[in-house]
């Protein structure tokens, strides 16, 4: 994963504070995905699997650059996540935040890596730590975060570390917020500052940063049909060739984005448990249930089932 120079330096400095400087870890610099993967691997081997999450919780405010300040000047928790979603590529171009409103009006902030990259599990832990640390710092009152989803193995240490319930062995990494917490005002909300910071980001930079989010939104709105470059490009104010090039720069394509959107929606509908396999297949754009079954196996390595699987146990926080 390519991350910003500021963010990379913040991680290195946080490790140095724990006595894990680059020299001790056998690295001279961190300038590529491979370097970052080596950094995490060697640092974790000397500490614990929870290190990326611990670092994320402790990274100083401002280390995420303008993204931190945009979030802090927003009116509420939900507004902060909305603006962070729009500009998160300033921190990590290949990582997206997907904001999902649930049926009970709660919200889930899900981390999506597009495309997948080596070390993404460590990246997810770092980012979820940053998100939790920031929102708790900025909110005008304590938040009762109901659930944190992690891909990690069951271990009560995760719950003790974040102070909330944790569902391990999840397919996704995500933070849940109640509707009440989503509306909580922020301590430093400043509409004028927010407007100034948005201008600092720049129109061209904003369109590039939000590109994948916008394409995903278009693809979801277009279901059960398949979004094409010919439809997406004019909707985004781009030429067909420019959109294709920008997606290629992110090592993805319109068909890959559509496939991920189908996968995510299919998973949501299956978890709801209200639809037959045939109905889910139709809603996500498959003409035949057999084609949907093959796609599900490709996505998740197992056949789909109409029976709702038993969720992993929730570990109570302190």
Image (cartoon, rainbow, N blue to C red):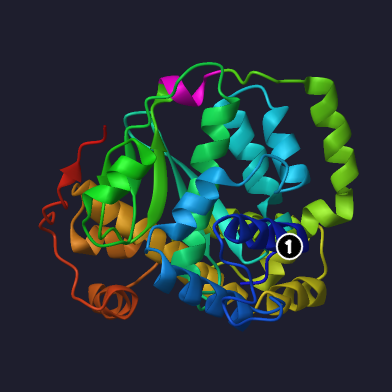
> Can residue 141 be seen by looking at this rendering?
yes
Residue in the picture at 79% in, 29% down: 194
Image x and y of residue 212, in percent: 64, 61
Q: Position of residue 64 (x, y in %)?
A: 70, 48
Q: Is residue 167 found left or right of 238 in the rendered image?
A: left
Q: Give me the residue at 49% from left, 76% from top.
A: 42
Residue 181 lies in the magenta-colored region: yes
Quadrant hosting residue 78: top right
Q: Residues within 10 Å of mark 1 (few under 14, many from 20)?
A: some
Q: Is residue 282 above or below residue 229?
A: above
Q: Is residue 175 left or right of residue 258?
A: left
Quarter occupied by the C terminus: top left
From which residue to which does the magenta span run? 180-184
On screen, residue 127 above or below 84:
below
The residue lying toward the viewer, choosing from 38 and 95, is 38
Q: Quadrant of the N terminus?
A: bottom right
Residue 236 seen in render: no
Query: Which picture quadrant has residue 76?
Result: top right
The residue that mark 1 highlights is 4
Asked if residue 192 lies left or right of residue 290, the reply is: right
Residue at point 71%, 49% (across, down): 87
Badge 1 element: loop
Which residue does the image show at 34% across and 55% down from the upper left?
Answer: 150
Q: Position of residue 73 (x, y in %)?
A: 73, 27
Q: Exactly how many numbered labels are in the figure?
A: 1
x and y percent of residue 112 in the render? 50, 60
């Amino acid at each position: 994963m390519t991350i910003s120079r500021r963010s990379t330096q913040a991680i290195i400095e946080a490790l140095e504070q724990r006595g894990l400087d680059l020299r001790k870890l056998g690295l001279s610099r961190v300038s590529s995905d491979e370097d970052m993967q080596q950094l995490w691997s060697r640092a974790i081997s000397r500490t614990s699997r929870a290190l990326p999450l611990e670092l994320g919780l402790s990274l100083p405010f401002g280390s995420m650059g303008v993204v931190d300040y945009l979030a802090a000047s927003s009116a509420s928790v939900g507004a902060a996540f909305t603006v962070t979603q729009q500009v998160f590529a300033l921190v990590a171009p290949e990582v997206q935040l997907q904001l999902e409103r649930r049926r009970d009006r709660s919200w889930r902030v899900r981390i999506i890596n597009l495309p997948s990259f080596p070390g993404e599990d460590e990246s997810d832990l770092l980012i979820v730590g940053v998100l939790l640390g920031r929102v708790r710092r900025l909110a005008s009152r304590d938040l009762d975060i109901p659930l944190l989803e992690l891909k990690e193995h069951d271990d009560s240490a995760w719950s003790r570390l974040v102070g909330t319930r944790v569902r391990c062995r999840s397919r996704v990494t995500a933070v849940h917020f109640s509707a009440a917490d989503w509306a909580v005002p922020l301590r430093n909300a400043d509409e004028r500052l927010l407007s100034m910071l948005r201008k600092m980001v720049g129109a061209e930079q904003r369109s590039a940063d939000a590109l994948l989010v916008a394409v995903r939104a278009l693809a979801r709105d277009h279901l059960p049909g398949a979004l094409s470059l010919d439809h997406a490009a004019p909707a985004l104010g781009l030429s067909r060739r420019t959109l294709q090039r920008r997606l290629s720069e992110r090592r993805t394509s319109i068909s890959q984005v559509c496939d991920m959107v189908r996968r995510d929606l299919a998973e949501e509908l299956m978890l709801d448990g209200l639809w037959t396999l045939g109905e889910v297949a139709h809603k996500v754009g498959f003409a035949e249930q057999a084609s949907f079954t093959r796609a599900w196996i490709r996505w998740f390595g197992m056949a789909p089932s109409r029976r709702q699987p038993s969720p992993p146990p929730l570990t109570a926080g302190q």
